[in-house]
Structures are given as C-alpha cells and as structure tokens.
Image (tube, helix red, strand yellow):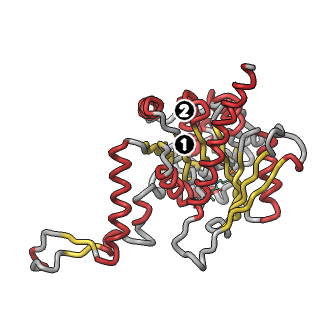
Amino acid sequence: MATSSQSEGGATFSAERYFATQPPPASLEHDVARVKEFVQRQLKEGRKVVLVTSGGTTVPLELNVVRFLDNFSAGTRGSTSAEYFLKAGYAVIFMHRQFSLQPFSRHYSHSTHPFLDFLDFDPSEDPSEASHIVVRPSERTQLVEVLTTYKAVQRAGTLLTLTFVTVNDYLWLLRAVSQEMSLLGRSCLYYLAAAVSDFFLPRQKMSEHKIQSGKGSLHIEMDQVPKILKPLVQEWTREGYIVSFKLETDPDLLIPKARQALARYGHQVVIGNDLHRRKFEVVFVSPKPKVSAGASAEDYEESWLRIDLAQNPQKEIEEDIVAELVKRHQQWIEAAGTQSALTAR
Ligand code: PMT
C-alpha cells in the first residue's frame, strides 16, 4: 500500500512506461478480435465508425479489490450520443463502464423509468394463472419506437459493445481499439465522453489484501495517469477526427482549459461542459481553420450550443451535438480529398 510515509513521491507515468509496467486486462485479446472483425466489416460496407467512450473508471486500492475510488458519471452523454450516431448512419463501438447506461436500454433505467412499472398481466386472464404480459398503453408508442430501432441496429450489426471497469482496463482498451480503427483513416471519429480518473495506484504499490482499518487514518499517494490524448493523436490514430470533453465546475475555466488541451494535443474539438449545465449547454472549442494548434488564444474559436428544456423537455442536447459533429467530420474527410488534389497538381 502506498502511504505518505512509504511513498517516494507521486510519479508521472509516460504512456510508454505505463503500458510497460501495468498488466493488460484478461479480456483484452478477446475484445481486440471482436473489434478487428467489426472494423473490417464496416470498412467493406463503407461505413464511418465512431468510438464512443462512456461512464467513469474505477481506481482499485487493493489487488484483491474490496475498495476503490469512482466518479459520478452515469454514462448518459455517451449512451444517448451513441443512439444519435447510429441514427446518422455511423457504426458505433460503444466502450462503456460496466453497468453504466447503454444505448436503447437507457430509456428503461431502473431508477428513472423502471421496466417493471410499465408491464401488466393480460387483463383478460385470471391474474392467478396469467401467462401473458402486456405493455401499458401509455408506454407503447415509445417502446415500439425504441424496440424498432434497436432491432434494426442488431440486424445491421452496427453496434459493438465493449466493457471496462478500472482505469487500467480503459487505457489498454482505448489503445487497442484506436490502433485497430486507424485502418479506417479519416472515416473514424473518436467521441471521448468517459470520465477517466486522473490518478491511479500502480500495481506495484497496491496492498495485496484488504487494507486494514486498525492502523488509524489512511494516507494514499496516487500517481498521475498518463495524458493519453497525446499518443492517441500523435501515434495510435493519426487521421481520426478526435473529440474530447472537458468537464469543469468553475465556468470561467471551461474555455481556457479546452484551449489548453487543443494546444497540448493538437486534436480537432474539445466540447466543454459545466457540471450543472451540461444537459442544456455545451461549448465547442476548436482551432480556427488553417491555423495549427498550439498558438495563441486568437487561434481558437468557440461556438455555444444551447437547448431550451422549459420549451421542449423531451429534447436531448446530444441530438444537436451529434448533428454538428457529423457535419464537421464530413468536412474533415472532404478536406483530405482537397489536400491530396492540391498536392497532386
Ligand atoms: O456520463 P454523464 O453522467 O452523462 O456525464 C458526462 C460527462 C460530464 C462525464 C462528459 O460529458 C465529460 O465531460 N467527460 C469528460 C470529463 C473530463 O473532464 O475529462 P478529463 O479532463 O479528465 O479528460 C479530458 C478528455 O480526455 C476526456 O475526453 C477524457 O475522456 C479523455 N481522457 C482523459 C484522461 C485519460 N487518461 N484518458 C482519456 O482519454
């Protein structure tokens, strides 16, 4: 266990050192085989592919894990957006935290819209011998709509679901998936909505067994998770269109932090969201056309997207986020064509 007295000081891991010292999850090989097959099929069928990451990562404190750190993310942003990407004709790799919300089933999550509450026994049968279940009339229209889309997606084979729990699972999976997706060139989009832990406890510093409470207060010093956007942009998927998210609770930090991320990693868009306003307001921050990332604040532009939930309570902001990204991604694909035509002249 890393306590403050035992620690040699929190370390910053490079991505390279991270993958050289932290073991891959047992399911990685199996997941990679599924991704390979999925990507090949979409390539053959000429579909664009989006990787949606969704939900929070845990940070285990013990090898035989009893305790772990977690965060608030429920996977609403990711699961909702995945549905709109499917609707827009994308194939979706949905990489999500186990038991967080998923496309389609999210409409019937147990806390907000419990599944059992809209089912009844067939009223024409004797309740003690009922064998048929019916859907309450008030729920039928929505269920038919959700089920129809869900079945169509299953038939088309355009949704692949992958699961992670810990930040280690997430990092290994993200690297492997992005390397497989890089085959798609500019046709792939990365939509990184997961809330990934910034700190972790390396395996070498973890207690093997449950940390005992008898020793008084607990001091843990964690190391920094490598900034994974850097190798993602610069090594694993050089042509992919990359959208990262930035969550803040201080609204004044949103735009400066988003610009900082673009300057540091050189990707295409940061979507900024404030914790309390994220269901109805986001800001797209991106480099101005033809200006390389990494320069001054004037080289970036912001565009706010807001919806009026009082006027339209059913509206989901993800519908507009995805519509905007589909447009920008298409422009990105077409820009490559223009560039190669210019080079050929
Ligand atoms: O799931 P919900 O409850 O709907 O909430 C959605 C959300 C608020 C979590 C989501 O919209 C969001 O903002 N996610 C990103 C949170 C954040 O601020 O992440 P970050 O600053 O730690 O990371 C920046 C970006 O890099 C993120 O896109 C993250 O997914 C990605 N990242 C971060 C660290 C890391 N090691 N690997 C990464 O890929």
**Residue where numbered disc 1 is placed:** 51
Can residue 29 be seen?
Answer: no
Marks 2 and 1 sit apart, C-alpha to C-alpha, by 9 Å
Looking at the image, the residue that sits furthest to the top is 344
Residue situated in front as seen by the camera: 334 or 148: 334
The percent position of residue 140, horizontal first and vertical second, equals 31, 71
The mark that comes first in sequence, 2 or 1, is: 1
Asked if residue 28 lies left or right of residue 6, the reply is left
Q: What residue is drawn where x is 74% and y is 48%? A: 4
**Residue where numbered disc 2 is placed:** 181
Q: What residue is drawn where x is 67% and y is 52%? A: 245
Q: Amino acid at mark 2?
A: Met
The answer to whether 277 is drawn above or below residue 168 in the figure is: below
The answer to whether 19 is drawn above or below residue 143 in the figure is: above
Element under disc 2: helix
Q: What residue is drawn where x is 77% and y is 59%? A: 254
Q: Residues within 10 Å of mark 2 (few under 14, many from 20)?
A: many
The answer to the question of whether label 2 and label 1 lie on touching residues, with beta carbons closer than 8 A, is yes
Element under disc 1: strand
Q: Amino acid at mark 1?
A: Leu
Residue 143: which numbered mark, if any? Answer: none
Q: What residue is drawn where x is 72% and y is 55%? A: 284
